[in-house]
Amino acid sequence: MTIPVQTDLLTKRYGDLTAVDRVSLAVRPGEVYGFLGPNGAGKTTTLRMLLGLVRPTSGTVRLFGHSLGTPGHLAQVGALIEGPGFYPYLSGRDNLRVLARYGGASQTRVEVVLDMVDLTARSRDRYGTYSLGMKQRLGVAAALLKDPRLLILDEPTNGLDPAGMADIRTLIRRLGASGCTVLLSSHLLGEVQQICDRVGVISRGRLVAENSVAELRGSASLWVVADPIDLAVARARSLLGDHRVHIDDGGLRVDVAGDRAAWINAELVDAGVAISELRVRERDLEQVFFELTDEGVSHVG
């Protein structure tokens, strides 16, 4: 089966600045792939190179086996990069009709995509009157006009309220389940954790990790609040080894599966340790992201 997205050592330089540095990634058929990175990490530049909007300095891009600039390169691709652009004096429906005419899509498809993004009721209103969230949804609708096999979305939930975000999340899940491959960038790590099959993390232009969300998050651990903590550490390390027991945030992190919680509790109590809290703790994608990129919350983008 042909790989929807494949890059090999993809690089973009602007003078002395390397915006994207030898990125090699592969997006598999039918998966929802999240592309994460801090502001300025190279996410949007990479997506623009995939679509031929920016010329790579070196490296290669193939979409469904087609190289940049070849006739089949964008034939099966829909995209929303950065922000949507439409005629402000036309209605949402008429904007899509114009795009369908120029893009060779069926006019009946316009009504389908308006319904998919829940804009049918406001489709006769001028685009200039739309809220930011409505504009974003119309942009997603435009990307879906050709019924693409690959959908590339740059921050698709930008400007949406929680209900709108949930709608787009449901839509992306449905597209993935139907066999459409989705590649999306987002700064909402909780959203990505919920909808993506695999994730690529880019930092300072380099792809620093690529794996399933579950693999990136790693195994669960136990978090224990114990007194005295020194005795708890000593006892736990004697049972499990030094490398699986850590003092963390005023408590004890024990790297074992959650089903061993009762055993750990009994062993520590038998050693004279008082346990005031013991629970399973899983790393979320946000924590992994910060570890991989060495960034603070304010730099996520």
Image: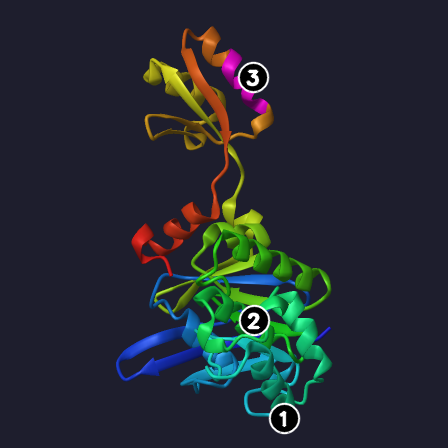
Residue 187 percent location from the top left of the image = 43, 58
Reading the image, the residue beneath label 3 is: 263
- Disc 1 secondary structure class: loop
**Disc ID at residue 129:** none
**Image coloring type:** rainbow
Please state, as top left, top right, bottom left or bottom right, where the N terminus lies in the image: bottom right
Q: Position of residue 294 (x, y in %)?
A: 33, 53
- Whole-number angstrom distance, CA of label 2 to CA of label 3: 51 Å
**Residue appearing at x 64%, y 78% in the figure:** 145
**The magenta stretch spans residue 33:** no
**Residue placed most toward the observer, 94 or 85:** 94
Q: Residues within 10 Å of mark 2 (few under 14, many from 20)?
A: many
Across and down, in percent, residue 260 comes to 57, 23
From which residue to which does the magenta span run?
260-266
**145 vs 65, nearest the viewer:** 145
The residue indicated by pointer 2 is: 140
Q: Residues within 10 Å of mark 1 (few under 14, many from 20)?
A: few
